[in-house]
Image: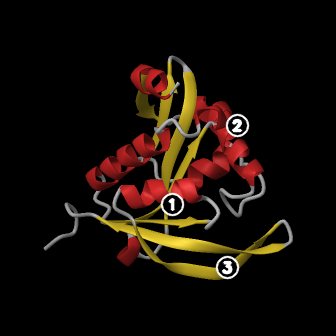
Amino acid sequence: MAKRTEQESRLDDLSRDDWPEVAQIYQEGLATGNATFETQVPSWEEWDLSHRGDCRVVLRRGTEVLGWAALSPVSGRCVCGGVGEVSVYVASRCWGCGLGSRLLSELIRRSEEAGLWTLQAGIFPENVASLRIHENLGFRVVGTRAAIGRLSGRWRDAVLLERRSSRVGID
């Protein structure tokens, strides 16, 4: 399935029309308990307001959305205007097909076009596949934020990763 999915899929801008499928894929991630501290999928309006409009992408085969990636600003402070928080989600039926790497690569490309110099990600240590994808695409582990938050009544750690652009913000 990996080769077939890769050959027949294309990257597009994520739009409001994609939201039902994007939300379903997000829900699949939530159900694992290892994707995010969020416990429910937000409305389109909430999600739209919290994510950059220029760094959103879906991967689709035909009209079917297979995965999505987007950036959120990390702060409203202007000094952090070139820093984005990464989200990458792939439909469970496509896990292990290499789509997460493809989505993250495109998100990196778009972020640099938008002038971002640093991307960061907070990933549960149990999410080994996501850690590997990020590290393979130039993210480095900054450290582990021990017991940073509670999820389902349990304190959870998050590995903090960052990727500094070699193209943007280099003097």
Q: Are marks 1 and 3 in contact (CB under 8 Å)?
A: no
Q: What element carries label 3?
A: strand
Pick out the residue farthest to the left: 171
Looking at this view, is 157 or 171 the one in front?
157
- Placement of 56 over or under 128, stated as above or below: above
Give me the C-alpha separation between circle 1 and circle 3. 18 Å
Amino acid marked by disc 2: Gln
- Placement of 43 over or under 62, stated as above or below: below
Residue linked to disc 1? 131
Rendered location of residue 4, percent (x, y): 46, 21
Q: Earlier in the sequence, mark 1 or mark 3?
A: 1
Residue linked to disc 2? 24
Q: What element carries label 1?
A: helix
Rendered location of residue 31, percent (x, y): 77, 49
Amino acid marked by disc 3: Ile
Give me the C-alpha separation between circle 1 and circle 2. 22 Å
Q: Do the residues labelled 2 and 3 touch (CB within 8 Å)?
A: no
Q: Earlier in the sequence, mark 2 or mark 3?
A: 2
Rendered location of residue 38, percent (x, y): 72, 60
Pick out the residue farthest to the top: 62
Q: Which residue is drawn at 44% across and 76% down?
A: 77
Q: Which residue is drawn at 61% across and 72% down?
A: 158
- Placement of 148 over or under 3, stated as above or below: below
Rendered location of residue 14, percent (x, y): 50, 36
Looking at this view, is 2 or 140 the one in front?
2
Applied colour scheme: secondary structure
Q: What element carries label 2?
A: helix
Residue linked to disc 3? 148
Amino acid marked by disc 1: Leu
Q: Is residue 94 visible?
A: yes
